[in-house]
Amino acid sequence: MKKLQVVLIGLGIASVATLYFLPKVVVDNEATGAKMEGGAEVSTVISESHENTLSSQNRVQADQLIDKLRTASSAEEKVAAAQVLAGIYKEEGIFDSAAYYWTEASGMWPDNLFLAEEAGKANYDAFSFALDKNKVEVLAEKTRSFLNKVLDKDPTRLDLKAKIAMTYVSSANPMQGITLLREILEQDPKNEEGLFNMGVLSMQSGQYDRAIGRFEELVQAHPQNIQGQFYLGVSYFESKEKNKAKAQFQLVKKMAQDPMILESIQGYLDKL
């Protein structure tokens, strides 16, 4: 599982980097929030030491923005500073810190749906890469709290519903997440995130035949989804469909540019 997780992170698939914590449930059987708007709760699991991990290029600007966030007299100035800080940390891949500052911004204007959505998505990114179980749970709750605010106003946002679903999959009630993903695909059978996540969860539970079906649907509707293309190859490989796996990996090899992806593909091709 850890090997798969490393590949996921290398591919930049934030939505499934928490596979290590997911229960091995049957995900494709056809028969079948606490409010945390301020920064206090998240600070119990996110250490302030992250402020020392920025590159020197961004460190000076971040220090100035942190000072402005603490001393500015108006909420507008504080929110603006928090947003820029979040962007700096996201740019450097420090997702828990980006989530922290989006949470701070939304806490200042709790009725602002733009800030709620950005805070929810930032907490989801941090949740996706978190490895500490307690941090995963806290960030999952915050994701749901923020994104449900947006969904309450706009139930058509299936992209946000998919993120909420994935936070449940890693919880004590994983079937709640699976049910939400199925609802998404009932509303939109070609939904990119729904198909992708159901495919990955089928892989995680060892149901590679079902994963193949999901990923084939995904790449037919969304051929540029390189993650789906790659995992279709992995699913063929695990199902012992060697000819299909080889052809699929060769296709992805032509599409990919990232060295880690290409290395992973070559590793599979060498085994075929």
Image: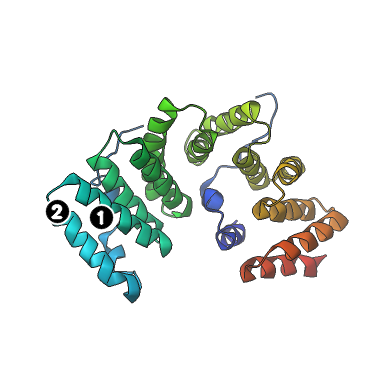
Please indicate whether residue 164 sits to the left or right of residue 100 in the image: right
Which image quadrant for residue 265?
Answer: bottom right
Whether pointer 1 and pointer 2 mark residues with C-beta atoms closer than 8 Å, the reply is yes
Quadrant placement of the N terminus: bottom right
Q: Is residue 45 visible?
A: no
| Element carrying mark 1 | helix
Front residue of this view, candidates 270 and 154 = 154
Which image quadrant for residue 121?
Answer: top left
Distance CA(mark 1)–CA(mark 2)? 9 Å
Please indicate whether residue 146 sits to the left or right of residue 252 in the image: left
Q: Tell me residue 63's x, y (percent).
A: 23, 66
Residue type of the residue flagged with mark 2: Ala
Q: How many numbered dots are placed on residues in this image?
A: 2
Q: Tell me residue 169's x, y (percent).
A: 53, 38
Q: Tell me residue 138's x, y (percent).
A: 36, 44
Q: Which residue is mark 2?
A: 72
Residue 81 circle label? 1
Front residue of this view, candidates 245 and 255 = 255
| Element carrying mark 2 | loop
Front residue of this view, candidates 7 and 175 = 7
